[in-house]
Image: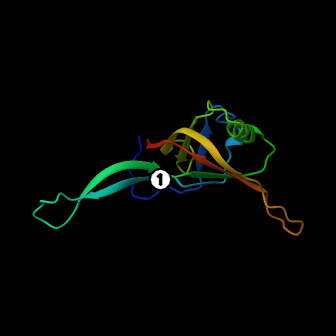
Amino acid sequence: MAEFRERPYSQFNFLVEIDGVGDAASVAGGFQEVSGLGVEVTVAEYRNGNERQNVPRKITTMAKVSDVTLKRGVIGDLGLAEWMQAVQNGDQDQLRSVTVQLLSEDRSTVAQSWRLTNARPMKYTGPTMSGAGGETAVEELVLAAESIVQE
């Protein structure tokens, strides 16, 4: 359970665990950035013809989970590429749970976590190559998930 405190946690201490890809201690989960953790609830407007007020009611309909983007330096690990390849080849048994854990500054406790269920890769972008640059080669994986739960 998340612990309340007055000062917000820093964003740079986090872990990403993908069921079936590497392990928790593996560098395969060493992502530099996670973005897109979010849920949007759609609201429909409806008004009966005999309503006394001329304003619609707001009715909650479906919830939509945002696509989550993971970025990491290219390290030669093929776990994510193999997962993407299996999905690309039509394997329907590739749904995974993904957990993003925000850690305290001393990395001893989990401050908060987000669990994505039935996640699958939907887009892979390889690094930009430049003979004149000195930056790290970064790959990007976009995940589609059916639900996200904050723990």
Whether residue 60 is situated above or below residue 95 in the rendered picture:
below
The quadrant of the rendering that contains the C terminus is top left
Secondary element type, mark 1: loop
Name the spot of residue 63 as percent of width and height, x first: 40, 48
Q: Quadrant of residue 45?
A: bottom left
Q: Quadrant of residue 135?
A: bottom right
Residue type marked 1: Gly
Q: Please, which residue is most extreme toward the bottom here?
A: 132
Q: Please, which residue is most extreme toward the right here?
A: 131
Whether residue 130 is situated above or below residue 116 in the rendered picture:
below
Left or right: residue 124 compared with residue 99: right
Name the spot of residue 142 as percent of width and height, x first: 63, 50
Name the spot of residue 11 as percent of width and height, x first: 55, 56
Question: Counting other residues with Cα less than 10 Å from the Cα at mark 1, is it few (<14), some (14-19), or many (20 or more)?
Answer: some
The residue positioned 64% from the left and 35% from the top of the image is 24
Whether residue 15 is situated above or below residue 69 in the rendered picture:
above
Left or right: residue 13 compared with residue 71: left
